[in-house]
Image (tube, grey):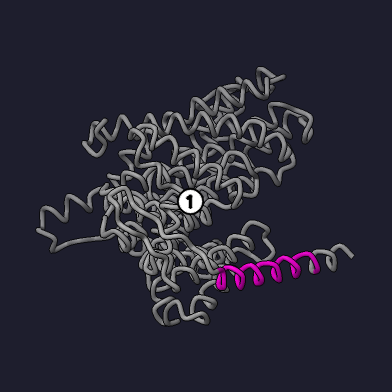
Amino acid sequence: METKSNHKKNGFIIFIALVSLYLICIFPYFPNLKTSSGDLIVLSSAGRLSIAILFFAVLLWFTEALPFAVTGLFSMVLLAVLRVNTFKEIVKAGFGNEIICFFIGVLIISAAITKSGLGNRLASLILYCVGTKTSRVVLGFLVVGMLLSMWITDMAVAAILLPLGVSILKRENIKPLKSNFGRALMISCAWGPIIGGIGTPAGCGPNPLAIGFLRDLAGVNIDFIQWMAIGVPSAILLVPCAWIILLKVFPLEIKELSISKSEIKKELEQHGSLGSNEKKTIAIFLLTVVLWLGAPLLRRMTGDIINLSISQIALFSALIFFFPFVSVLSWKEAQSEIDWGGIILVVSGLSLGMMLYKTGAARWLAWAMLGKIGEVSPLIRIFAIILIVSLLKVAFSSNTVTGIIIIPLIIALAQDLGLNPWLLAAPAAITSSLAFILVTSTPTNVIPYSSGYFSIKDMAKAGIIMTVVGAVCVTIAIAVMGQITGVYKF
């Protein structure tokens, strides 16, 4: 009965979405807007159709009447059916984008780290390093989650931390939903990876999505070091804030674990010495990081003769795992670890975002929603964008969906204001990944939530505070680093 009821509800939502699509298509009045320089923005018929399809997609993404990836593909079909562009060009805009190679590469590298046992070994070092005080254990999970997810997808890091955290709680006989230590520890399994995910382009889905939009829509190439200049300081500021908030919202009833440090050491020793696959994985991982960080220098030294993109490097490194005498994992194992639905959502979202931009719809929407933002000081502008994106994320229930919608709008607005698009896109892109409130915003939250040690209300209670504090932290990081690098001038 429940299934039939859900089918009826979702069918009704899809019907409403289609009706809304039709009504926006025939709506007679979309006002002309003026930019700050006096230029008139007239919404074209193709732009109107793009907005109608965007509204259709947002409604389905918001209600989850269809899977996120299915809605993305459906939007691509509608763009072609309504003749916003040819189907060939629509597909090319998303599936022809090199970012798809970056995603595949990073997910394969994550799979290798997990399958080789290296991830579990690294996670086991947490307790040995931080000791047995419960407050330090929570901090340890946040720090390790942050450090790992700068290089491994945040979802994979949450999956690595979860079993270790649950084993600690079970050893202490802590029951689900009965302990503040259980709540704080399990939420730290999500927050640590989320925070670290903003540190580098490899951290999570919205990061390369933003880089792809900036390159394709504005001709701005953001390399690994440019992203890290803002992402890493933001992450470093967020970790202590997350730790303090978790301890204040969930006062720990247990001050010390019952296990001794010598017992922890004995458990760590059971892993034995580094295995062959772990050594190979470390070598390939370090090669990847060196190439990512050194690519800009290599390009300058060779006069653009060697110009490696982050996508090329990720895919090249991932393919090494399958070479003879390496064979860290099989293709079948890699396939099972790759989130193909997430990749489809990103590339179909790229198609929708590109069409919004090319038809002028993104420019019109940007001025309708955010036109006044150019009148405030740069510092307030950064903070306002961060808060706006945080609120949109609560509405859309997905980091990637938020990035798909907001980044093209931000880029169009920056160009009209005569600003470097990275100035506005940086706070928006970083904030797209910070999902502290809703469990459903990212699988990184769902994984620890599945343990049953905290409720949706628990996460929202701490997450609302963390979102406001996080907005301040990211604003400070961008302002300070922007001054140092010369990108922002206040």
| Dominant SS type (magenta) | helix
Query: Which residue is at 13% across, 60% downward?
Result: 304
Q: Position of residue 372 (x, y in %)?
A: 40, 43
Q: Quadrant of residue 72?
A: bottom right
Q: Position of residue 298 (x, y in %)?
A: 17, 54
Query: Which residue is at 39% across, 41% downward?
Result: 373
Query: Which residue is at 39% across, 64% downward?
Result: 42
Q: Is residue 379 above or below residue 404?
A: above
Camera-side residue: 122 or 1? 1
Asked if the stretch drawn in magenta spans residue 19, the answer is yes
Q: Position of residue 319 (x, y in %)?
A: 38, 66
Query: Which residue is at 24% across, 33% downward?
Result: 489
* Residue of label 1: 153
Camera-side residue: 20 or 174? 20
Amino acid on which disc 1 is placed: Thr
Camera-side residue: 348 or 370? 370
Q: Is residue 271 above or below residue 287?
A: above
Q: Which residues are magenta?
A: 8-27
